[in-house]
Image: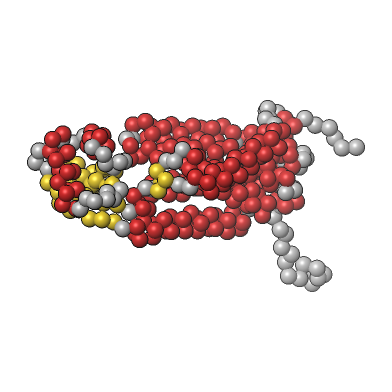
Amino acid sequence: MAEEYKVEQLNHGRKVYDFLRVGNAAFAISMILVVASLVIISMKGFNWGLDFTGGTVIEVKLTHPIDLEKVRADLNAQGFKDPIVQNFGSSRDVMIRMAPIEGMNSEVLSSKILDIVHSNADEGAEVKRIEFVGPSVGAELAQSGLMAIIVCLLCILVYVGFRFEWRLAAGAVFALAHDVVITLGIISLFQREVDLTIVAAMLSIIGYSLNDTIVVFDRMRENFRKIRRGTSYEIMNVSLTQTLSRTLMTSGTTLLAVLCLLFFGGEMLKGFSESLAIGILLGTVSSIWVAAYMALKMGVKREHMLPTKVEKEGADQPSMLP
């Protein structure tokens, strides 16, 4: 008869949270969100920014620093929809990017932009350069961004597959795809403008989510080898409990920094910080209820975590020493 024990004994007498008890419901909700995100993306598509659609780029030289938010608001008020206004090089150099305007050549557009800047910000400002960035450049950027995400996921799949047992690797990669797809679904639903900062946010989400999942899986592998009794279900709950404080502290401090960017970073960082905040929350949840739960359902056991014993050559031969 097997010796009876309490699950707390597997955690040195400390409390063990039963995370996987709600695994079925949590995983089902995650899958519903993934499917819903794919449907939303297919129906609504994305609101591509100027980085991908092309547009007009105007460089303005100033005599003194100005409030970029005010210039952006003034341009919007004059009918220039969603212009991107940012410094480059120095606080006296401003780049203005906007969608192409039909029936307006570069000379007329340059004159209108200067009139707005002169009347509301800097009377001595002058246009240094104005050019049109065509859609061919935008298409190339879109393809490069998509390839960057795909290559990143494939490299992670290879890395995790070598480092962990394949059941854990499959759960980790699926959790990464889960985080990216749901984040893109939310961006598509609210039609947030997609530019290169969003691509950067997606890659950051992949890295952050992978880091959290690897920490959890490292502890699981360690406990599977160290704890001699207990089911896979119990050992995984012990591991998730032991890494909970680290997960909450890391996610909390990172989320705090991202929220500071969201509220104080200005319009240019809004899309990046929103996407990253969503990804951090999803990555924390997916490490428990997607990656770990999926590995459990795929039948991960202690035997899968034990290092393979390599038999030395000649070990089966009798010793020749007396």
Percent coordinates x, y for residue 99 in the rendering: 30, 48
Q: Is residue 249 left or right of residue 98?
A: right
Q: Which scheme is used to colour this image of the protein?
A: secondary structure
Q: Is residue 135 left or right of residue 278?
A: left
Displayed quadrant of residue 90: top left
Look at 59% across and 51% down and name the residue there: 173
Q: Is residue 184 left or right of residue 21?
A: left
Look at 54% across and 38% down and name the residue there: 282
Along the line of sight, the residue nearer the viewer: 190 or 141: 190
Residue, far front: 103
Numbered-mark total? 0
Percent coordinates x, y for residue 318 in the rendering: 82, 70
Percent coordinates x, y for residue 30 in the rendering: 62, 40
Along the line of sight, the residue nearer the viewer: 310 or 244: 244
Q: Residue 181, can we see it?
A: no
Displayed quadrant of residue 116: top left
Look at 53% across and 46% down and name the residue there: 43
**Quadrant holding the N terminus:** top right
**Quadrant holding the C terminus:** bottom right
Q: Is residue 198 above or below residue 234?
A: below
Percent coordinates x, y for residue 261 in the rendering: 37, 35
Displayed quadrant of residue 161: bottom right
Q: Residue 261, can we see it?
A: yes
Residue, far right: 1
Along the line of sight, the residue nearer the viewer: 314 or 243: 243
Look at 46% across and 34% down and name the residue there: 255
Residue, far left: 124
